[in-house]
Image (cartoon, helix red, strand yellow):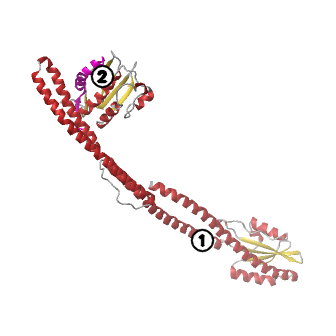
Amino acid sequence: MRARLIVILVVPLIALFAVLAGAYGRSISLAAQQELFVDRLGDAGYFVTSARQALRTDDPLVIEGELERYRRVYGIGAAVLDRDGQVWATSGITPATFDDAAIDAVHTALSGRRGDAPRTVLPWRFADLVLAEPVLDDGDLIGVVVTSSNMESLSRDVLRQWLLLALGGALAVGASLFLIARLANWVLRPVRRVDSAMKEIWQGHMEARISDTTGPPELRHMIAVFNSMAEEVEHLVQRQQEFVSNASHELRNPLNALLLRIEHLAMGLPDEWAEEADRAREEGQRMARILDALLLLARGQQAVPEAGPVDLEDLVRRRLRAWEPISAEQEVTLALRDGERVFGVADEIMIESAFDAILDNAVKFSPVGGTVGVTVSNGGEFAEISVHDDGPGLTTTDLELATERFWRSSGHQDVPGSGLGLAIATEFLTSCGGTLVITPGPDRGLVVTLRVPAGGDAG
């Protein structure tokens, strides 16, 4: 962001300087040429008076002495031509050495007109300045005064000024870049602090705050709002964790009491009820493990589930046995299809809870006499548990929304439930590095697949 801000401010500045420097450099060159032209025009006007007298008396010696002194003092050659364009008096220049532009200027003067000022702008294109001034006597052309000035000195002066202008511009741009960089740092420093504090909060450090409030007033206000928001979030998270901890503690006491009563009841039951007592005992112990898992999730990123090899085929068999009373009540058959011993790397409680949430939906939405088929397979990098029901299924649009919290399909509003099952399963799997995939069934219903990283056997 800092680089983009600097570029946004510096590029227009450089463009503006380039336009202004180009216009100023052009004006410097034009002014220098115009000044030289006016100076040479004044010199030529002086020689016109002397040349007129010399041409009237037909005595070139009168003007030649002045032309020679002019050349020695200023280094500028000059000549006087007669009306036919022939050299009449000179201090070292002849029309034979002139370029096309100079010859045009002489022809213009021989026609009785004064030539135009030069239009060259670039100093490296300066040619010798040849100025031709007509000599008139009572309106009649009797000759032409020609001066030829070398432009090398003028070209060097203009280039020197352009170099100084470029150097000054470079220094100005450098100073501006330094100031803009400092300004960008000053403006963006609060943004970087907010970003750093947000990362700390994301990592679980809810106490992260921004103490330095330097920067523009708008960003100082943003920091104050962020600190207030962070305090409110920390307060809410603390309340949530306290609630879950208290709920877990309060539920453990009646759950432990329930387990003790099951143990006492099991002692007085006939042998044919022993299996049911074991199932009740197992479900109670599982509820205790679920309380631990909920407490773990409530702590967020500070707590990571303990992943290890889990026999998914054995887990599915155990959970299907536990669900048999509920499925029998709903007149739905639970079937393990093509079961194979597959191990996944995950937290067992998380996988059990996710599988229960999926199985609950499958039984709930299956019709009377329907079947819920479960398949355990090895999908390469992932171990998979697929649950296929005979329910009405979902549309393509509904499939994209199915894992959102509290979402209910418009066609299933009369079915009891909160719309949290798939969302909770997704959250459990995500905490274990797994994913949840929902696809339409081959004929009808849904196929919900739980994927967790594949792993070796427990041994």
Q: How many marks?
A: 2
Query: As drawn, is 418 to the left or to the right of 349?
Result: right
Instruction: Determine the CA span between mark 1 and mark 2.
Output: 86 Å
Magenta region, main secondary structure: helix
**113 or 392, which is in the foreground?**
392
**Mark 2 surroundings within 10 Å by alpha-carbon count, few (fewer than 14), some (14 through 19), many (20 or more):** some
**453 or 426, which is in the foreground?**
426
**Measuring 32% from the left and 46% from the top, which residue is drawn there?**
236
Amino acid type at image mark 1: Gln
Residue 91 image position (x, y, % from top left): 75, 78
Which quadrant would residue 28 be assigned to in this image? Answer: bottom right
Q: Is residue 433 above or below residue 44?
A: above
The stretch of residues the image draws in magenta is 304-333
**330 or 53, which is in the foreground?**
330
Q: Is residue 90 above or below residue 259?
A: below
Image quarter (top left, top right, bottom left or bottom right) of the C terminus: top left
Residue 245 image position (x, y, % from top left): 23, 41
Residue of label 2: 375
**Mark 1 surroundings within 10 Å by alpha-carbon count, few (fewer than 14), some (14 through 19), many (20 or more):** some
Residue 233 image position (x, y, % from top left): 34, 48
Q: Secondary structure at mark 1?
A: helix
Residue 294 seen in the current view: yes
Which quadrant would residue 449 be assigned to in this image? Answer: top left
Q: Is residue 96 above or below residue 365?
A: below
Q: Earlier in the sequence, mark 1 or mark 2?
A: 1
Q: Is residue 237 above or below residue 101?
A: above
> Can residue 327 be found in the magenta stretch?
yes
Residue of label 1: 161
> Can residue 189 be found in the magenta stretch?
no
Residue 457 image position (x, y, % from top left): 21, 29
**Measuring 26% from the left and 33% from the top, which residue is drawn there?**
350
Amino acid type at image mark 2: Thr
